[in-house]
Amino acid sequence: MSPTKFAKIHTIDKNKSIEEQDQLTQETKHMLLSLPREKGWRTPHIYLFQGFWCQPAEIQAISTFQNHFKAKDSDVFVATVPKSGTTWLKALTFAIMNRQNHLISSKNHPLLSFNPHDLVPFIEYTVYGKHDRIPDLSNFHEPRLFGTHIPFASLSNSIKKSNCKIVYICRNPLDTFISSWMFVNKIKPPSMPTLKLEEAFEMYCKGLVGFGPVWNHMLGYWNESKERPKKVLFLKYEDLKEDVVFHLKKLAKFLDCPFTLEEEKEGVVENIIKLCSFEKMKELEVNKIGTFGRNFENKFLFRKGEIGDWTNYLSPSMVEKLSKIIEEKLGGSGLKFRVK
């Protein structure tokens, strides 16, 4: 079923939440009037914008980004389905690209003092996330590194036309769902009730989740990676976990900064893996305190990082239902996920 078939056209009244109206321009508020709306996970509503679901503030930021961002050929974007290894991939990408300026073995390495989301800022939450303000990007160190959850089709035209690179990661939707549900219940406003597993699951199966439907999100980058493999590198979380050395070398080569034989002999690859490991990042003081994006607490970014945690939460009928949906949506694309 397409998203528009279960969406409802709505009107905006004066009693909407701060999340929906505060800091929104009149143009954005007017736009929302024409967009299908459904109940959100951590906000009262999410809206169908350019074929995917997101919140009002995100719509505003993405619109500004699309209208004003000018890509450079040297830019690198870390694009992800939410809760699919975003923090890890950002850390790995930053470490690889900056290893000449910041020695991996240095006690002053930025990843020891900054959260990966500070070093690779989100387009929609951080860079363009301030009340329709056009940011000054002149002070960004080059090559510029950005992060995003925006679907490929909605990236700015300058990104699509340039020679900039996109590294994409997704994860088995069963694990992604559980991780998303857990995360949302930690970061939701106190005024919002706890989102029950069963309700969240039904919403997820209908595609009603931030930047979803997830199958459309994955297919957008998957198809582009097949069409333009030098522009988009498509990774799966499970594959990266299974053989991180192989995929780290693949990532470095894709980014045009492959590891030299000398670096490999000196253990640079292994040191990057240790520096960016889940265990290492979780224990850093900077990741136990502080916030990123729209005041999301860093400590909530690190839960388990395991494969197959869904088995502890989903009933057999849930697994069967979501597996059938994924098989149907991804069928014929060549993109598959191992359930066990």
Image: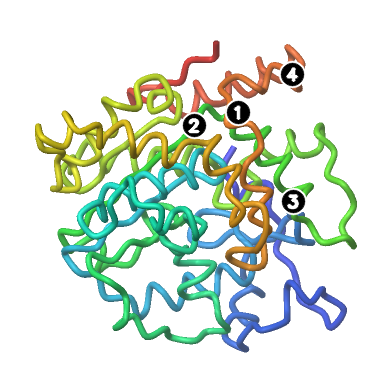
Separation (CA) of disc 2 from disc 4: 17 Å
- Sequence order check, earlier mark of 3 and 1: 3
Counting other residues with Cα less than 10 Å from the Cα at mark 1, is it few (<14), some (14-19), or many (20 or more)? many
Residue 143 in which image quadrant: bottom left
Location of the N terminus (image quadrant): top right
Q: Tell me, for residue 175, which label it has, or none.
A: 1
- Sequence order check, earlier mark of 4 and 3: 3
Q: Tell me, for residue 171, which label it has, or none.
A: 2
Counting other residues with Cα less than 10 Å from the Cα at mark 3, is it few (<14), some (14-19), or many (20 or more)? many
Q: Which amino acid does label 4 sit on?
A: Asn
Separation (CA) of disc 3 from disc 2: 20 Å
Q: Tell me, for residue 334, which label it has, or none.
A: none
Residue nearest the viewer, comparing 7 with 138: 138
Residue 16 in which image quadrant: bottom right
Q: Confirm or deny contact between disc 3 and disc 1 (CB under 8 A).
A: no
Q: Which amino acid does label 1 sit on?
A: Asp
Separation (CA) of disc 2 from disc 1: 7 Å
Q: What residue type is labelled 2?
A: Arg
Q: Confirm or deny contact between disc 2 and disc 1 (CB under 8 A).
A: yes
| Label 2: which secondary element | loop
Q: Name the residue under label 4.
A: 312
